[in-house]
Image: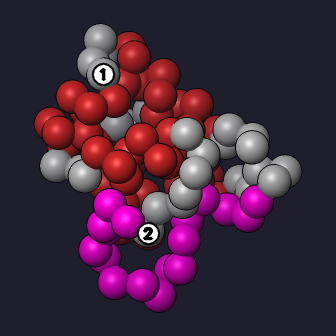
Amino acid sequence: MKITVAVKKLDAHIAALGMSRCGWAKKHGYPLPVVTRFLKGERGVSFCTVAKFIEDSGGALCWDDFLQPSETRGPVIEDLGAPCVESAS
């Protein structure tokens, strides 16, 4: 599994705030599994979640960070046609 630019930047942003992944997810209203699985490289996220990650990171992340494919899988944005609802599954 390869960690992507977006994962590295989001993890660094959370650490720079002195927060845990759990604390950051809770503060911004994300289901914890969505954040932890994304940061472990186990799943991508929806278009809407990417937009929210960018907003909630205060500029630490940008669209290009999510569009760069890793060597082991495609871009980290899942089906762009999916509704803007993120679930823990």
With respect to residue 57, does 64 lie above or below? Answer: below
> Neighbour class for label 2 at 10 Å: few (<14), some, many (≥20)?
many
Q: Is residue 51 visible?
A: no
Q: Is residue 53 magenta?
A: no
Which residue is at 34% across, 37% downward?
57
With respect to residue 32, does 18 lie above or below? Answer: above
Farthest residue in the bottom direction? 81
Figure quadrant of residue 58: top left
- Seen in the image, is 22 located left or right of residue 42? left
Q: Which image quadrant: the C terminus?
A: bottom left
Residue under label 2, please give it: 47
- Seen in the image, is 43 located left or right of residue 71? left
Q: Which residues are magenta?
A: 73-89
The answer to which of 61 and 38 lies nearer the viewer is 38
Q: Amino acid at mark 1?
A: Ser
Percent position (x, y) of residue 3? 68, 38
Which residue is at 29% across, 12% downward?
18
Residue under label 1, please give it: 20
Q: Which image quadrant: the N terminus?
A: top right
Percent position (x, y) of residue 60? 44, 33
